Amino acid sequence: MSPNKLTRLVVQSIARNMRGFLFSSIGIVVGIATLLFFTSLGSGIKHVVLERIFVVRLLEVEKKSYDLGGGMRSGGLFGSKSLDDRTVEELKQLAGVKDVYPKMKFTFPASARGGKRLLGQDMTAELIADGIPSELVRDEVRSDLGFEDWGAELSCAAETPCPDGFSCEAAICQPKACTGADSTTCTGFSYCHATRNACALPIPVLINPTLLEVYNSSVHTALGGSRGAMSRMPRLSEDMLVGFEFDAVFGESFLGRAAQGESTRERMRLVGFSDKAMNLGVTVPIGYVKRLNARFSGERAAEEYHSIVVETSSNDAIAHVAYAVTEQMGLSLSERHGQAQRAGLLIMLITMVFNLIALIILAISAINIMHTFLMMIIERRRELGLMRALGATRSHVRWLVLGEASVLGLFGGSTGALLGYLTTRAVDAVFNHYVAQFPFKPDSLFLLEAWMLLASIGVALLFCWIGALLPAFRASRVEPASAISGR
Amino acid sequence: MRIVVEGLTKTYGQGEAQAGVLHDLNLVIEPGEFVAIVGTSGSGKTTLLNILGGLDNQYRGQVTIGAHALSGLGERALAGLRNRHFGFVFQSFNLLDHLNAVENVALPDFFATADKADGPRLAPKERALALLERMGLLDKQNERPPRLSGGQKQRLAIARALFNKPSIILCDEPTGSLDRKTGLQIMDLFEELNVNDSITLLVVTHEEYIARMARRVIRLEDGRVVSDTVQEPHRPEPELAIASTALQPATEEAQ
């Protein structure tokens, strides 16, 4: 029988008993809606936790530490290998590694002052910062200043001119001389450095969006009840902050002065937000950190990284890369990796429990479908016998029953998917309306992907087929002679 | 298609409970014959018809339809034979109430396999409409069976039996649910099909006046052929038919 004929026959059969058909589909609709709801909820929560809170694909490699009588030691005789450029190259060679970027923190005191434009008055705070390579975050920079090391020696040529405030001399960009009152020499992003009397470009800064999230959801709320200007601090957005400038004092802060070198004041400019930036502090191009560490803490401080972030090509590669880093290279992973693994496992288990409930509903539906189809075969025994007399093979009868089950599956699956989708929208609307803002509060609790919708229909079909398989074989065994005569 | 039955034996049950229905039957039915199979209730008429039509393949002996020995045919081939060469007409019509007249007539098309030897054929719906017109039911093409009279239902069933241009039509008590006047009209229709279309007709009946319209009468008793006679067909007047003796009420027929 051609698919076209089978379809027409199935449609004729279903049209005859639409009420029974709709009744049979209720279980499938509810089961699929439940399955889709919990699968997308699990994915949504997993996405927030593992992509925003514990970014599981980013493994932060540290030197192995040993606990010696209550004191931690790392490196040297008791620790693992150094985190230097050679280690970075070794990590890049590992299978499953997409990118490697070293991180180096400030090893000297620093402070930041500014904020009048945003907050109404300047504020001073300790400045914690680290540095990462520019090429890793170029796509995330939202300012024309870019995330470049403008403090390094910049070469120039006719086709690669110097940035604003610099002039090309002997193929090297040199800062133009200026005075504090001279605002015309230093154009564009450049400004006149007060002590060097020369133009300079601000140090580009990236901030982790988590920091903004924590400020808006917790700090801003807490300060709302304080006295004075602090109570009037606004909620901040990324758009408001990009382009924000403040002054940094390197080598000196509330906590003390650097062991060596004269403190210096530089301007910083926020150029974007990135998950690769440090969680509490600011991130600048690593070249600045190396030079400042060498200046205030000595050359050795500029040669060793504090950690190296390894980005895996996929979640599947995490285990392999983690094993290679810890067992083969003798390094360790930060505690966040363990937290991410535990969080992921917990979410997976909870999702599995709920999906199991949905599958139980579907299994009950399949039993209901089996019962319905078996009853249908008893009712339609004479009709099936007639079909056999008119030339239907056993296979035709089987396909007729399975065809009806397929339509039931497609209808139940599609309706269930639609119901599941509408439920997620409704829950999201309630969640966004009634649940107060909290750190990492997502716009949606659900992550609904196209494959989930297709899989829902596939699962519905599967359970309908399972339910209809036995009835289909029973129907195909109906003997035409006895069925027609009613025996 | 020639029908040859050799040593046909059919039993129900097993062991001591085994009961014979047909005993060593031997028959030859030539193409184009109009045969009535008569007998009392339980004589094996319907069982014989089911076996000849390929609806029952649990028997001993040999049944050959044309060049095909039924016992040697696989399930698909047997279904194909039923679809292409046999038409069935039943006492209770066996129409599908959820389909209209055209859809009922065209039902065998769902199970038909294309055969190049048939040459170009009309589309299923056109074929069904042509048959409804021949049966005088064209104006009922969109009606469903519950809205038709008994005679109309049986003519609809005959139209369905003719859908694939069968060479043999097997009728099991085709007039059993009809009044005698309507029954005679149905028999006239069979006569016309037999004469004009050369279709072999096998009619199981318990009514003598129906049997007298056939050209050959095979009488069964306890699963055995007790007589096999060729006769001059005789069509009774409706009122005479009413007066004729029925062997058994149709509703008591059970094989």
Image (cartoon, rainbow, N blue to C red):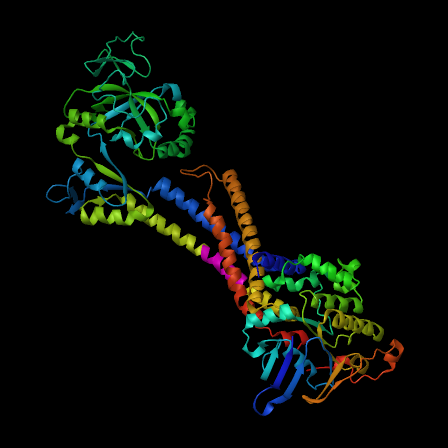
Query: Can you give x and y, in whole percent of width and height, for residue A287 in the image?
Result: 22, 27
Pick whichever, B104 or A175, lies toward us.
Answer: B104
Q: Please identify the dominant SS of the magenta region.
A: helix
Is A96 left or right of A351, judged from the image as shown? left
Is A255 left or right of A118, judged from the image as shown? left
Count of numbered circles on the image: 0
Quadrant in the rendering for residue A293: top left
In the rendered image, residue A34 lying in the magenta stretch gets the answer no
Pick whichever, A304 or B9, lies toward us.
Answer: B9
Is B134 left or right of A121, judged from the image as shown? right
Pick whichever, B219 or A43, lies toward us.
Answer: B219
Pick whichever, A245 or A162, lies toward us.
Answer: A162
Residue B121 visible in the snapshot: yes
Tell me what residue is drawn at x 61 percent, y 71 percent.
B81
Image quadrant where one finds the N terminus of chain B: bottom right
Is B240 left or right of A350, judged from the image as shown? right
Query: Can you give x and y, in whole percent of width and height, for residue A142 in the image?
Result: 37, 26
Tell me what residue is drawn at x 78 percent, y 75 percent.
B175
Query: Can you give x and y, in whole percent of width and height, for residue B213 in the image?
Result: 80, 79
Query: Can you give x and y, in whole percent of width and height, for residue A153 in the image?
Result: 20, 20
Q: Which contiguous range is marked in magenta?
A: A355-366
